[in-house]
Image (spheres, helix red, strand yellow):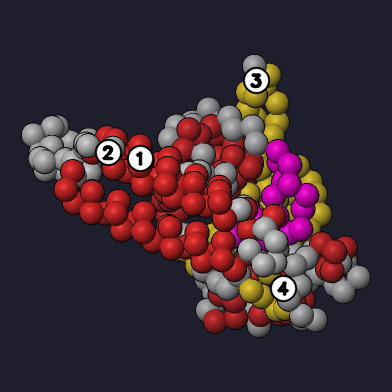
Amino acid sequence: MVQQLEQLEAEAKAALSEVSDAPALERFRIDYLGPKGKLKSAMSWLKDASPEDKPKLGQGLNQLKQQLEGEFKQKQETLGDAKPRVTGPAIDVTEPGDPPRMGRVHVLRQVIDELIEVFGRMGFDVAEGPELEDEQHNFVDLNIPPEHPARDPLDNFYLDATHLLRTQTSTVQIRVMEQTPPPVRIVSLGRVYRPDTHDATHSSMFHQIEGLYVNEKVTMVDLKSTLMQFAHAFFGKDAEVRLRPSYFPFTEPSAELDIKMTVRGKTEWVELGGCGMVDPNVFEAVGYDPEKWTGFAFGLGIERIAMKRYGIGDIRWFYENDTRFLSQF
């Protein structure tokens, strides 16, 4: 091993002495000092060396490396670097620049802004509330009893025994009525959370808009008129809507809102959300007199509205941040 080291040293020094220009010096560096060079390969001799030779061999390899690197730097100062040097400016200031890419508002934000504008024209104010809620506002005040399936821990994101991520923006309606005497006319928008399996039509996080109107002598006629005006303003003057009887704990009577649309060449009724007259128990929970005040409420999925309006086939596309999709809107 020691003899091999002496042979490598003689070979390296002879090769370095023959170097006469910068390209040849770079080839020497690659052959002897590079990560795959002969000196690096020689380090593997240590594992095969005898215990007596190993200290001498290791010391010799280190000395040879330091010696060759020193002589290489001296040659480099004399001959220069083989790598081409840029003598001009790093940036060609005469070259036309690339125009900045303009961003755009996310399609869901566009829909939210338009919904606010549509309902704003009908006199609805925007109300907001916390996404972390307590059971009192998320269930109890909305007339949802403990045995109701909607309160199952498997169907909610509970953070502790009494707090969870809100499952609906109806909680904002409760908070507004607790602090505001009637009449009240608001829409509440925001994220809601339910542990649904992700697929083309379900997500564990999505957006809702819910409306509430409380006044004297409010009827189902007012509710249907409001939803028809919304449909005509958002989907076009020819949009048809219908109210289909349904059940919700916080409204009585209750209905599903359907809109007639043409989907893949087929005209059909598509569900957009639920609605109904506010249940008297909800009014009592917030301190309103149900004998004096009546009101209606509705809730619509914003992703569903956007999907039906633009013919989007998968709710997951909203959240994947694929600019090929988002740049279409």
Q: Position of residue 63 (x, y in %)?
A: 43, 63
Q: Is residue 1 shown to the viewer in this render?
A: yes
How crowded pointer 1 is (Cα within 10 Å; few <14, some 14-19, many 20+) is rated as: some
Q: Amino acid at mark 2?
A: Val
Magenta span: chief secondary structure? loop
- Give yes or no for residue 149 being in the magenta stretch: no
Residue at which label 2 appears: 19
Which mark identifies residue 264?
3
How crowded pointer 4 is (Cα within 10 Å; few <14, some 14-19, many 20+) is rated as: some
Q: Position of residue 237 (x, y in %)?
A: 49, 31
Task: Measure the C-alpha gap from mark 2 to mark 3.
Answer: 75 Å
Residue nearest the viewer, comparing 1 with 130: 1
| Earlier residue among tags 2 and 3 | 2
Quarter of the image for the C terminus: give it.
top left
- Give yes or no for residue 192 being in the magenta stretch: yes
Q: Secondary structure at mark 3?
A: loop
Q: Nearer the viewer, mark 3 or mark 1?
A: 1
**Cβ–Cβ below 8 Å for labels 1 and 2?**
yes
Task: Measure the C-alpha gap from mark 4 to mark 3.
Answer: 39 Å
Residue at which label 1 appears: 15
| Earlier residue among tags 2 and 4 | 2
Q: Amino acid at mark 3?
A: Arg
